[in-house]
Image (cartoon, rainbow, N blue to C red):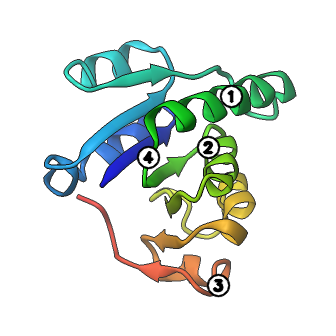
C-alpha cells in the first residue's frame, strides 16, 4: 500500500507523524508546506511542497489542484490521509477521480465546531475519523478513535 499524507505543517503535520508506528512499514510520501518545521520533521521522508497559504486562496487552490493531479498520476497512491487543512481538499477530490481511498482525521483542537476542511471533504471521504465524541454530531458516519498520542 502506498500512502500520500497531504497536510499543512505545524499541528496538522504533528498529528500525522504521531501515527509513525502504523505507517513506518508502508511506502509513503508527504505533501506539505515548505516551512522549517516540516523540513525538519520530514528530513528523511519523501516529500513534496505545496502552495500556501491555503486559507481561502483561490489562486493556491488552483495551484494545489494542478500539483495534486501531477503527483497522484506520478506517485499512484492507494490512499490519501490528512488532518487538514486546505491542502487536503484538492488532494481528496482529485484522488477520488483516480480511485484513491481517503482517510480524514478531524483535528484534536476542534471540540465543539467542525473545521471548514472537514466539512468540505466529509461527503467524499471513505473513512472520516474524529477524536472527540462531541464531533460526532457534525459527522454522523465518523469513527471515534479518541486522542492521537
Q: Which residue is mark 2?
A: 91
What secondary structure is marked by label 2? helix
Q: Position of residue 97 (x, y in %)?
A: 68, 54
Q: Which badge, 1 or 2, is on the more N-terminal residue?
A: 1
Q: Quadrant of the C terminus?
A: bottom left
Q: Which residue is mark 4?
A: 77
- Tell me if label 3 and label 2 are in contact, CB under 8 Å: no
Q: Nearer the viewer, mark 3 or mark 2?
A: 2
Image side of residue 127 versus residue 97, left or right = left
What secondary structure is marked by label 4? loop
- Tell me if label 1 and label 2 are in contact, CB under 8 Å: yes
Q: Which badge, 2 or 4, is on the more N-terminal residue?
A: 4
Q: Position of residue 127 (x, y in %)?
A: 50, 72
Q: Nearer the viewer, mark 1 or mark 4?
A: 4
* Residue lying at 56% horizontally and 47% vertically, measured from the top left: 84
The image quarter in which residue 137 lies: bottom right
**Which is more toward the observer, 59 or 9?**
59
Distance Cα–Cα, label 1 vs label 3: 30 Å
Identify whether 77 is placed above or below 63: below
Q: Is residue 105 visible?
A: no
Amino acid at each position: 500500500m502506498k500512502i500520500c499524507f497531504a497536510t499543512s505543517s505545524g499541528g496538522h503535520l504533528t498529528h500525522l507523524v504521531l501515527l509513525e508506528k502504523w505507517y513506518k512499514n508502508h511506502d509513503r510520501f508527504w505533501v506539505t508546506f515548505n516551512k522549517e518545521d516540516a523540513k525538519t520533521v520530514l528530513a528523511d521522508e519523501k516529500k513534496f511542497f505545496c502552495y500556501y497559504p491555503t486559507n481561502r486562496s483561490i489562486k493556491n487552490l488552483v495551484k494545489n489542484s494542478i500539483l495534486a493531479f501531477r503527483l497522484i498520476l506520478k506517485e499512484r497512491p492507494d490512499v490519501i490521509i490528512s488532518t487538514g487543512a486546505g491542502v487536503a481538499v484538492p488532494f481528496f477530490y482529485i484522488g477520488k477521480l483516480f480511485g484513491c481511498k481517503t482517510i480524514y482525521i478531524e483535528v484534536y483542537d476542534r471540540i465543539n465546531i467542525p473545521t471548514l476542511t472537514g466539512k468540505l471533504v466529509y461527503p467524499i471521504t471513505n473513512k472520516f475519523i474524529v477524536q472527540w465524541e462531541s464531533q460526532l454530531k457534525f459527522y454522523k458516519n465518523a469513527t471515534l478513535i479518541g486522542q492521537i498520542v
